[in-house]
Amino acid sequence: MELQPEFVSDLAETPLHPALVDIATAFALPLVSGYETANTFYVPLSYKQVIIYRDLEPSIRSVVRCKDTHNSDTVIFDVTLVSRFGDVLVEIEEFVMKRLPNQNLQVKQVRPSPSAATITSTSEMTLHRLVADGIGTAEGMRVLDCLLRVGCPYQVLVSPYDPNAWSALLDASAAARNSGSAKSNKGQEEAVVSQSRPAISTPFVAPANELEQRLASIWKDSLGLAEIGVDDNFFQLGGHSLGLVQIIMKCRKALRADIPVGDPQFLANPTIKAMARFAIAGSDSVPVPEMPGIKRISRETYRVT
């Protein structure tokens, strides 16, 4: 892979050039059994670690090893980026990509009525609502063209809503959850989460124990749903890969358990019940270390004369 001469200067400000890294990590997808570029779409999900030995060069080579070529739903790669002379520049361990079902690739955009274009509560900030209210592809291209013609500033925000009002809603919701007693916090959460559970084929199964109840509470808060069954698939509930990573990190912090981010079995069917099993195993096998306490030391002990 090689950058065109007019883009080589980008490396001075962006050592890990996104164009090089994107192609270097995803070009090996045809190694996966049954991969079809016309009908299949993969999105990056996570990685275990990235080791940077040197900045990328204008011309690099990528060595990719697929850990399981027969798992077409969740693909895990080990990637090594080297120079033209074979010097190792970057190592990416367990780079995970998730295949999206075909039905998730098509999102119908329905223009809301003028009265519905204003979001008045955080419970309305669902993925489907934001997509429905968002600008279309042709509109986005025209906006980008205008910005490039007049001189695009460093940061541009295009939103169908008033950003100040939206920010105020988020701040108010966060303040309500972090203040008052546990009872009042619970009431606030129930007031915010008002979306009904989607009509999916999986029968609803309520949480059976305290662990599943705690996980369900985090899932409901993150997805904005009133009810979630322990067998409900995260993606069928309207979640996306980035949201799943965020939920996993929240659950790891709340439960102090080593819940894996890129486990293929979990990613193939992410449910509360499966996460509970990983939480129990992670809690038993890899306990989260406690931070050492700070000991008070007398100044006289280390007095310098």
Image (cartoon, rainbow, N blue to C red):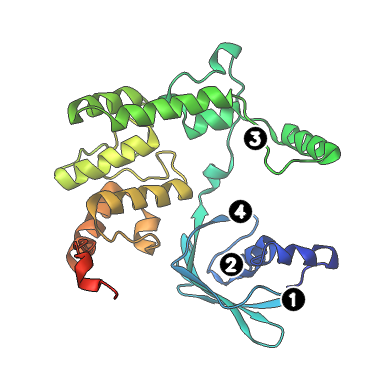
Residue 32 vs 254, above or below: the answer is: below
In the picture of the structure, the residue carrying the numbered disc 4 is 39
| The one of 97 and 173 positioned closer to us in this rendering | 173
- Where does residue 227 sit, x and y in percent of width and height? 29, 32
Label number found at residue 157: 3
Mark whose residue sits in front, 2 or 1: 1
Q: Residues within 10 Å of mark 4 (few under 14, many from 20)?
A: few
Quarter of the rendering containing residue 41: bottom right
Mark whose residue sits in front, 3 or 4: 3
Q: Amino acid at mark 4?
A: Asn
In the picture of the structure, the residue carrying the numbered disc 1 is 59
Sequence-earlier tag: 1 or 3: 1
Q: Amino acid at mark 1?
A: Ser
Label number found at residue 29: 2
Say which element carries label 2. Answer: helix
Q: Amino acid at mark 2?
A: Leu
